[in-house]
């Protein structure tokens, strides 16, 4: 009698042990717990276990310690993680990866999850010719940067943040909270130019001013002078012991490019997350998909899940078709959510806009509707409306007739035509966790936020849904027969 032997597991090598590479390994471990189908080797340049990069601004603010932001490491026979080692060359023909310790890894499938790095603008003093930061200058991309920011900046000391996007504003909020004197310089006409409109930005800048942060929009920096500060194009010098550069990122695409794989600003991938080489895939911030998604963790995690299903063979037809990004500013005391089409120049078709502007109260709301569906919103100081509108945006459900009540976060009657599929409402966007999954976890015994997080992963991304999960949980716990009885 002859026995057929199972084929050996396919070898998958992942380059990058960041948020998306680590999530891919975790997903594979979940789908193939015994390592029978595939063996994954993750190589990561950073000399430590993977962590939640999104929460680095919280580390700067002092809300988290580095240990509190570690990501789970799969403890299964099918996953090996090697930290402190970088991939230096890729040979797609021989299916071989070269590492900086002189060794090589052969693969059946290669996953690029190399992320992105901070871009330093070409301003005198900001970066050396080799690209390294100038004296007193740091980016905010990894834990080492965080430590540098905190060592450069002492309470009471002046700090300049270069770049008034989401990251810069989060860093500024964290630094002022630690007692520093902070200025933000933004070269666009207004802060968070990509996500919010000008009136919202004006109110947001006022809120920052009230916190002690001076915002200089539409100002170009001309020179960083260590020990003095940042000189602007109008000749003013903003005092600064340190310069934190948050002026955009650049995808780490060199490995792919040098291997002859097609790249633009990212490594080009299709809906199967495959590059121009059939055995090489790319996910996360280094990938460029026609539906967008680079720069945010939710699309990267979705890509990791799709690719894990494909490469383990558990769902070979799984596909990633793009994502609709939502931005939530993580700045203590400021509630800002923005998504979709919110800029007036996008008013090219039949868009209906409802706006509330309350500069004195530091509040602003803008709702953009097209064909009875929410297509965009900016909500500063309206957390209830933010929750409702983002759900309508996600589900594509029709908008209630009373738009004004809706943007104020007041109760509204649902449209008669259809009702929103409430159970399918996304509560944690980063991890695509629905209300139904949280209720199911509760029914299965998860009674605390930590237990819900362990079961569903809700709240473990950017943390923006903590309030919603707590509210849901408290409602459920109130109905707990064990408590009532
Ligand atoms: C401070 C901060 C706040 C953020 N806030 C948010 C937020 O609120 N919401 C949101 O959605 N997104 C946010 N982001 C963006 C989010 O962190 C990224 O989208 C996410 O980290 C992308 O994951 P990734 O794995 O693709 O890249 P990364 O997390 O950057 O990981 C890539 C890893 O690959 C490693 N690597 C690179 N090249 C090599 C090589 N050749 N060999 C070996 N290893 C290599 C790098 O060292 C790195 O560890 C934030 C980012 C920062 C920095």
Image (tube, helix red, strand yellow):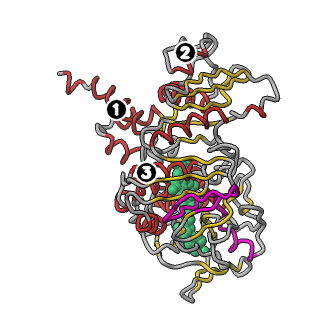
Q: Earlier in the sequence, mark 3 or mark 2?
A: 3
**Could you say which quadrant of the image residue 253 lies in?**
bottom right
Viewer-nearest residue: 339 or 134: 134
Question: Left or right: 444 with respect to 351?
Answer: left
Q: Local crowd at mark 1 within 10 Å, few (<14), some, or many (≥20)?
A: many
Q: Position of residue 12 (x, y in %)?
A: 58, 70
Could you tell me which secondary element the residue under label 1 belongs to?
A: helix
Question: Left or right: 123 with respect to 455?
Answer: right
One can see residue 21 in this view = no
Q: Quick check: marks 1 and 3 in contact, CB under 8 Å?
A: no
Which quadrant of the rendered structure holds the C terminus?
A: top left
Residue corresponding to mark 1: 473
Q: Position of residue 104 (x, y in %)?
A: 59, 85
Q: Residue at x 38, y 30 (%)?
A: 472
Q: In the image, is residue 252 part of the stretch drawn in magenta?
A: yes
Q: Earlier in the sequence, mark 1 or mark 3?
A: 3
Q: Residue at x 59, y 53 (%)?
A: 300
Q: Is residue 443 above or below residue 26?
A: above
Residue corresponding to mark 2: 405
Residue corresponding to mark 3: 176
Region rendered in magenta: 230-259
Q: Quadrant of ligand 1?
A: bottom right
Q: In the image, is residue 392 part of the stretch drawn in magenta?
A: no
């Amino acid at each position: 009698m002859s026995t057929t032997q199972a084929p050996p597991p396919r070898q998958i090598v992942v380059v990058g042990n960041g948020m998306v590479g680590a999530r891919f390994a975790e997903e594979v471990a979940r789908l193939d717990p015994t390592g029978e189908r595939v063996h994954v080797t993750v190589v990561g340049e950073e000399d430590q276990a993977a962590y939640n990069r999104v929460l680095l601004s919280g580390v700067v603010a002092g809300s988290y310690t580095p240990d509190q932001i570690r990501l789970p490491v799969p403890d299964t026979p099918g996953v090996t993680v090697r930290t402190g080692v970088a991939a230096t060359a890729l040979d797609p023909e021989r299916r071989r990866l070269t590492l900086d310790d002189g060794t090589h890894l052969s693969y059946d499938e290669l996953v690029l999850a190399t992320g992105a790095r901070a871009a330093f603008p070409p301003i005198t003093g900001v970066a050396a010719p080799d690209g390294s930061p100038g004296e007193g200058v740091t980016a905010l991309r990894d834990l080492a940067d965080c430590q540098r920011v905190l060592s450069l900046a002492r309470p009471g000391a002046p700090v300049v943040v270069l770049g008034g996007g989401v990251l810069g504003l989060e860093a500024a909020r964290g630094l002022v909270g630690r007692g520093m004197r902070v200025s933000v310089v933004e070269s666009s006409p207004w802060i968070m130019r990509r996500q919010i409109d000008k009136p919202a930005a004006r109110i947001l800048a006022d809120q920052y001013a009230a916190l002690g942060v001076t915002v200089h929009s539409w100002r170009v920096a001309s020179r960083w002078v260590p020990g003095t500060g940042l000189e602007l194009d109008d000749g003013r010098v903003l005092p600064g012991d340190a310069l934190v550069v948050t002026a955009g990122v650049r995808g780490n695409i060199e490995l792919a490019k040098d291997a002859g794989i097609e790249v633009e600003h990212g490594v080009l991938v299709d809906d199967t997350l495959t590059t121009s080489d059939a055995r090489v895939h790319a996910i996360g911030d280094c990938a460029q998909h026609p539906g967008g998604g680079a720069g945010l963790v939710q699309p990267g995690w979705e890509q990791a899940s799709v690719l894990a299903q494909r490469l383990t063979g558990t769902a070979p037809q799984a596909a990633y078709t793009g994502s609709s990004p939502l931005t939530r500013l993580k700045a203590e005391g400021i509630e800002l959510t923005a998504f979709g089409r919110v800029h007036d120049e996008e008013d090219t078709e039949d868009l209906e806009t409802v706006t509330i502007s309350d500069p004195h109260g530091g509040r602003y709301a803008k709702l953009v509707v097209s064909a009875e569906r929410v297509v965009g919103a900016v909500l500063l100081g309206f957390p209830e409306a933010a929750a409702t509108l983002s759900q309508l945006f996600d589900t594509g459900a029709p908008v209630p007739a009373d738009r004004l009540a809706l943007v104020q976060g007041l109760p509204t009657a649902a449209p008669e035509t259809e009702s929103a599929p409430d159970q399918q409402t996304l509560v944690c966007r980063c991890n695509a966790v629905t209300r139904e999954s949280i209720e199911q976890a509760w029914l299965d015994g998860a009674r605390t936020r930590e237990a819900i997080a362990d079961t569903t992963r809700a709240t473990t991304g950017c943390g923006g849904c903590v309030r919603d999960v707590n509210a849901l949980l408290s409602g459920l716990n109130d109905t707990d027969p064990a408590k009532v009885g």
